Image (cartoon, helix red, strand yellow):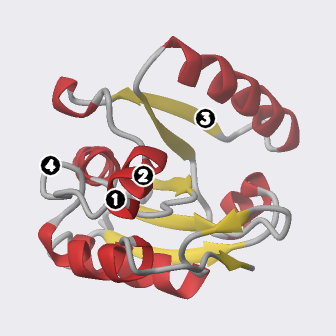
Amino acid sequence: MKDVRTIRIALCPGSYDPVTWGHLNIIQRCAGLFDKVIVVALVNSEKTYAFSSAERVEMLERVTADLDNVEVDQYGGLVAEYAREHGACALVKGLRAVTDFEYEFQMALINKKLMPDLESVFITTDARFMYLSSSAVKEVARFGGDLSDFVPMELERMILDRLGPKAKREVKL
């Protein structure tokens, strides 16, 4: 008799501008809960990014290379539509504080309306990363600060080269 097991696919959507230790922590934990995880760097033409979508994908690929069940992609439409197209059963979002929950809860309700079978799963960040945000990383980098407590080592140079004291540009997609 065949094993007719359903593969549980989760999406971890976000801006990832840039990727932080907090993001990686959520992705790693998600990889332990689902058969397949697709980390999606979202593209919003109304938003100004420090890194292009291709660069954000590259960062994600670097830091998830050791996670066999994780794929990286980019997308510029509705997350619920991407989930439907890729057979995802869950959207996983990391939460640092109550303020994160308020926004993510609203998004979960919208996604549920668009795709009723899609579940939103909230994972609270590890306490070591509760203070951490991509905005904070960008600010520390702009002043040439030490990023080792904020981002994986393999991303430090890329971030400092783009945002450090001698850098002057941001990327608008």
Q: Earlier in the sequence, mark 2 or mark 3?
A: 3
Residue 133, image x, y percentages: 41, 42
**SS label for mark 1:** loop
Residue 89 as seen in the image, left or right of residue 84: left
**SS label for mark 2:** helix
Q: Mark 4 highlights which residue?
A: 149
Residue 149, image x, y percentages: 14, 49
Quarter residue 61 falls in = bottom left
Q: Earlier in the sequence, mark 1 or mark 3?
A: 3
Residue 150 vs residue 14, the one in the foreground: 150
Q: Mark 3 highlights which residue?
A: 119
Assess whether mark 3 and mark 1 are in contact (beta carbons under 8 angstroms).
Answer: no
Residue 9, image x, y percentages: 47, 57
Q: Earlier in the sequence, mark 4 or mark 3?
A: 3
Q: Earlier in the sequence, mark 4 or mark 1?
A: 1
What amino acid does circle 1 point to?
Phe
- Which residue reaches farthest top? 98
What amino acid does circle 3 point to?
Glu
Give me the C-alpha separation between circle 4 and circle 3: 32 Å
Residue 116 as seen in the image, left or right of residue 74: right
Residue 108, image x, y percentages: 70, 31
Give me the C-alpha separation between circle 1 and circle 3: 40 Å
Give me the C-alpha separation between circle 2 and circle 3: 34 Å
What amino acid does circle 2 point to?
Glu
Q: Mark 2 highlights which residue?
A: 139
Assess whether mark 4 and mark 2 are in contact (beta carbons under 8 angstroms).
Answer: no
Nearer mark to the viewer, of 1 and 3? 1
